[in-house]
Image: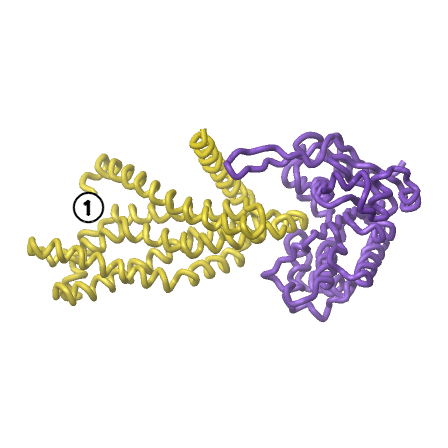
């Protein structure tokens, strides 16, 4: 009985979050948000995560280089180290890493900020002053998270190449030139498209969940705390499930229309 | 006959509450309640804490949708209107929240500027002049560039009033405007509210627990008891009201019919 109640509430939450997402889209179609506010939010989200994303990107690149070095040394194929490590980062690890970083920093921050605005009646006040909270508050944050994800993905990838080059040079004595040589050949357009699509989907999940959880917060400080925790958990689970789904769909699509995924 | 600006017809408000074990129950706050407020009237809603005064106010302001029943604003069924039509009516309303609901990330001046910037087509110079005018009216012009958490509770109330008044609304809702304030500041705030109301000929709906302030502000007083409302008329008629619940509340007696309800 208890598990039925939990299942029911999970389905209820997913349905409500989807309806919230549709409302955001409707608001976007009706009237776009203020450009100033949007740029301000993009700047805020990007700056909040710049250092952590850059650092994480650098070390992911380094980890990939170490892992691939161990495997590829056996086959005498160290020349392909840069191409393979970068391809894996572009296709999979980069978007996932950016999404997790943003979920931890921006997702938690946004749901706490909106939750506090909800419990202190600031969102009600906006409505009472004749403005639409979805338009004024939610939409700029939602769009900013999506836009900033792409900037941060780019930064993370550049830093990961840096990390890969450093470790590739130290561990496998692969020169910078050699590391970079096979990247254009192995990192194909479909790999980049795959990474961008994943980045977009993860960002939409994160933006929807954190704004929804913040917007629907109830119950004071405890409610805000719960909203933050729920945002973190729901986003992580949502991103992992979406990653599996997109990998599966992308694999099927690429095999059907292009041939080899590389 | 006076024009009705706000009307609740057979309104019931229920909230869904989720228990510790995940089970949800409906809690009924207001039941089959009807109420009419006419243009230019000053109404006070009083009653024991936790029995639905703020819920009633938010229902009147279109912030809480009744589970059953209808809200009529200026003769129009509010929830039958499109969202843009609702927005147009909401611009005619202003509200001071119980805990002020000031935008804490904005400076005091920006708090008052917000509704003007979002809902009018006035130029920046015109908006600035209006902001200064309302801040001066509540005695806060000197605190324009401070943040809400840098001013006292009384000043925050006044700032909330200035923000609620900025669009010169025709209907003003005040949720416990004197909560936590000393009697002198409370009296000054009420005087400020009445002066602004007289200048603009607006309709005033005030929720309060303080009977002295209710007598000071209201033309008509409503008591909210368990899920229901009782109109006791003018302050004079309210003082003479024979209902033992009203008398217990006015005189603050610990024993009486209300004690059982509010305990």
Residue B233 shown left or right of residue B127 in the figure: right
Residue B47 shown left or right of residue B146 in the figure: right
Q: Identify the image quadrant of residue A81.
A: bottom left
Subunit of mark 1?
Answer: A
Please state the horizontal and vertical placement of residue A39, each as a whole percent of the image: 49, 58
Please state the horizontal and vertical placement of residue A238, each as a whole percent of the image: 38, 42
Which residue is disc 1 drawn over?
A262
Q: Which chain is yellow?
A: A
Residue B137 visible in rendering: yes
Please state the horizontal and vertical placement of residue B208, each as a whole percent of the image: 78, 49
Viewer-nearest residue: A161 or B59 = B59
Please state the horizontal and vertical placement of residue A132, each as a whole percent of the image: 61, 47
Residue B22 shown left or right of residue B253 in the figure: left
Q: Quadrant location of the N terminus of chain B?
A: top right
Q: Residue at x 16, y 55 (%)?
A: A68
Q: Residue at x 20, y 66 (%)?
A: A166
Q: Which chain is purple?
A: B
Label 1 CA crowd tier, 10 Å (few <14, some 14–19, many 20+): few
């Amino acid at each position: 009985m208890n598990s039925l109640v939990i299942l029911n509430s999970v389905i209820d939450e997913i349905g409500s979050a989807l309806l919230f997402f549709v409302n955001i889209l409707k608001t976007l179609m009706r009237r776009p948000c203020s450009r100033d506010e949007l740029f301000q939010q993009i700047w805020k989200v990007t700056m909040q995560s710049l250092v952590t994303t850059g650092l994480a990107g650098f070390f992911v690149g380094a980890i990939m280089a170490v892992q691939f070095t161990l495997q590829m040394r056996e086959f005498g194929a160290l020349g392909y180290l840069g191409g393979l490590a970068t391809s894996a980062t572009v296709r999979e690890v980069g978007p996932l890493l950016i999404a997790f970083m943003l979920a931890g920093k921006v997702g938690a921050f946004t749901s706490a900020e909106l939750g506090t605005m909800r419990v202190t009646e600031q969102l009600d006040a906006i409505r009472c002053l004749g403005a639409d909270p979805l338009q004024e508050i939610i939409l700029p944050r939602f769009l900013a998270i999506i836009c900033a994800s792409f900037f941060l993905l780019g930064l993370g990838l550049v830093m990961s190449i840096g990390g890969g080059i450093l470790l590739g040079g130290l561990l496998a004595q692969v020169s910078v030139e050699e590391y970079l040589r096979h990247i254009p050949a192995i990192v194909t357009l479909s790999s980049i498209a795959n990474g961008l699509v994943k980045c977009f989907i993860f960002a939409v999940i994160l933006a929807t969940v954190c704004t929804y959880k913040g917007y629907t917060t109830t119950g004071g400080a405890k409610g805000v705390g719960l909203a933050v925790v729920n945002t973190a958990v729901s986003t992580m689970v949502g991103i992992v499930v979406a990653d599996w789904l997109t990998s599966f769909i992308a694999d099927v699509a690429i095999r059907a229309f292009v041939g080899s995924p590389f | 006959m006076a024009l009705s600006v706000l009307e609740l017809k057979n309104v019931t408000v229920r909230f869904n509450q989720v228990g510790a074990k995940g089970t949800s129950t409906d809690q009924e706050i207001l039941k089959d309640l009807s109420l009419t407020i006419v243009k230019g009237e000053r109404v006070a809603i009083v009653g024991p804490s936790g029995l639905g005064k703020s819920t009633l106010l938010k229902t009147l302001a279109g912030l809480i949708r009744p589970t059953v029943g209808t809200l009529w604003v200026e003769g129009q069924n509010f929830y039958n209107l499109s969202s843009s039509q609702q927005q147009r009516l909401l611009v005619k309303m202003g509200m001071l929240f119980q805990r002020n609901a000031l935008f804490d990330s904005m400076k005091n001046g920006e708090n008052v500027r917000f509704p003007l910037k979002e809902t009018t087509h006035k130029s920046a110079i015109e908006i600035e002049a209006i902001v200064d005018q309302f801040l001066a009216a509540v005695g806060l012009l000197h605190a324009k560039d401070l943040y809400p958490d840098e001013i006292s509770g009384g000043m925050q109330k006044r700032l909330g009033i200035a923000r609620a008044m900025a669009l010169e609304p025709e209907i003003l809702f005040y949720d416990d405007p004197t909560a936590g304030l000393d009697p002198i500041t409370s009296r000054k705030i009420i005087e400020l509210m009445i002066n602004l109301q007289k200048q603009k000929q607006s309709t005033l709906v005030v929720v309060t627990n303080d009977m002295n302030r209710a007598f000071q502000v209201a033309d008509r007083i409503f008591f909210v008891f368990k899920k229901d409302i009782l109109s006791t008329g003018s302050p004079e008629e309210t003082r003479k009201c024979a209902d033992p619940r009203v008398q217990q509340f006015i005189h603050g007696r610990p024993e009486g019919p209300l004690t059982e309800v509010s305990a």
